[in-house]
Each structure stands twice: as C-alpha cells, then as structure tokens.
Image (tube, rainbow, N blue to C red):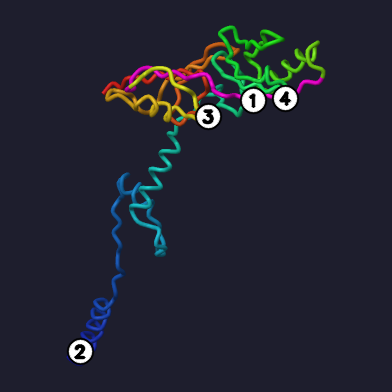
Amino acid sequence: MRALFVPVIAVLSAILLSGCMQTISPVAAVQPQSDLDAMAYGTPSSGPVAATGQGGAIPALRNSFAAATRAGAYVVPAGYVPARRDSAYHLDAGDKLRVVVYGQEGLTNTYAIDASGSITMPLIGSVPARGRTTAGLAAEITAKLRNGYIREPSVAVEIEAYRPFFILGEVQAPGQYPYVPNMTVESAIAIAGGFSPRARRDIVTLTHIDASGVARYEVPLGTSLKPGDTIQVGERWF
C-alpha cells in the first residue's frame, strides 16, 4: 500500500508544479482619451509609432487651429469685385485725368471729372467720362477732334489722381482721404489714424456706388478698396 501511495504523490506534485510555472501574458490597460487629448495628440493607433521628429502636442495643436481657422475663414460676399487696373477702371466724378494730345500743347492738360460726369476741353467742349475706361474716353476725344478740328489726332488718357474714399465710425480721424492704388480696408483705417478703443476690429461695412446703384457689404479688413467707397467701422459690444 505504501509502495502505491508514493508514486501517486509524485504524480500530483508534478501536476501542481507545472501549473505554477505557466507564464502569464502581460495585459496593457488603455485609458479612454478625452476630446482635448485627441485634439492635442491625435487618435491612438494600435501599432508602434515611428519617431519622425514632427509629432508631439505643439505641432498637433498648430495643425488643429490652422484647420479651424480655414473652416471659419470669412468669405467676401459675392458681387464685390476688387479694384482693377486702370485699363478696366471705370471713371467717375472726382477723378483727375491727364489728357495728352500729341503735337497739341494747348489741348494737353489735367482735367477733373465734374459732378455731371464730364470733362471740358478746348475746341470740343464737354466730353462724357463717367462709366468710361481711359481707353474709351481717349477714343471719344479722338473722334470729336477729328470731326473738323485735327486731321489725325493722337490722344492718350491716364489717371493722375483717383477720386477719394470716405471712412466713418470708430476710427481716430474719420473723413475723406485720397485713394491710393492697391489699397485695402486695413490700410484705409491706418490712414485714418487707426481704430478707436471701442471699434469692432474684424469686419466693417463697405458701401460701393456704381452704374448699377448702391451696394453694401460686410467685409474683412483685407478686402480691396475702390475709389469712392465708404467704410463704416462699427462699435463692438464688449
């Protein structure tokens, strides 16, 4: 009986020892990420992450804010066309023109477009200029001079000074100022002395008048300005 009991104990001991020697696989505990963590560090991946030198919180935040800026960027309303070059620019009252008639010093001079939209020249009198381009006005002057005054006139018209723009509201020095080519709303505000302490500094109201009538737009500060435009800088609420 004792001889039988000893092998049984040996077998049971071997089984118990083998169970105790089994390895336990490690378990990785992943805590749920908050929305802020996801924005800063990105969505976690299941595989290893290679070190590229471009990861980390700061680049991720920069990319996130850049994407948010693009998504919320202010779009200039349809219908407002930035100021164009002189060849396509339409003249109006207040513009000053340099009219050159080659070989005719008595006709070559600076002419201002009056309130009726015309210029007045020797020999030919009043010439409508409102709504014309410089090339169109030169052609009109040429036709009038050829009609009984000069056999083959050669005429060139260029803009010497644009009509002014106007700025009102929350700026240091509201009023009328000379227009300069390639101006923006922001540069116009700078010419007027900058914002007042109560000014709204992201969007202004811009009024434009042309042959189709009066149009008003809410535009950002980078919007191109046209001669004769009126800028209204509003007051912020807080």
In the picture of the structure, the residue carrying the numbered disc 2 is 6
Report the Cα–Cα distance between label 2 and label 3.
109 Å
Residue 88 against residue 115 in the figure, above or below: below
Q: Who's the residue at 38% across and 29% down the image?
A: 190
Tell whether position 171 is magenta: yes
8 left or right, relative to 108: left
Dot 1 alpha-carbon crowd within 10 angstroms: few under 14, some 14 to 19, many 20 or more:
few
- Secondary structure found at label 1: helix
In the picture of the structure, the residue carrying the numbered disc 4 is 102
Q: Which mark is residue 88?
A: 1
Q: Nearer the N terminus, badge 3 or badge 4?
A: 4
In the picture of the structure, the residue carrying the numbered disc 3 is 181
Q: Nearer the viewer, mark 2 or mark 4?
A: 4
Q: Nearer the N terminus, badge 2 or badge 4?
A: 2
Q: Nearer the viewer, mark 1 or mark 3?
A: 3
Report the Cα–Cα distance between label 2 and label 4.
132 Å
Amino acid, disc 1: Ala
Q: Who's the residue at 49% across and 24% down the image?
A: 179
Q: Nearer the viewer, mark 3 or mark 4?
A: 4
Residue bounds of the magenta highlight: 152-172
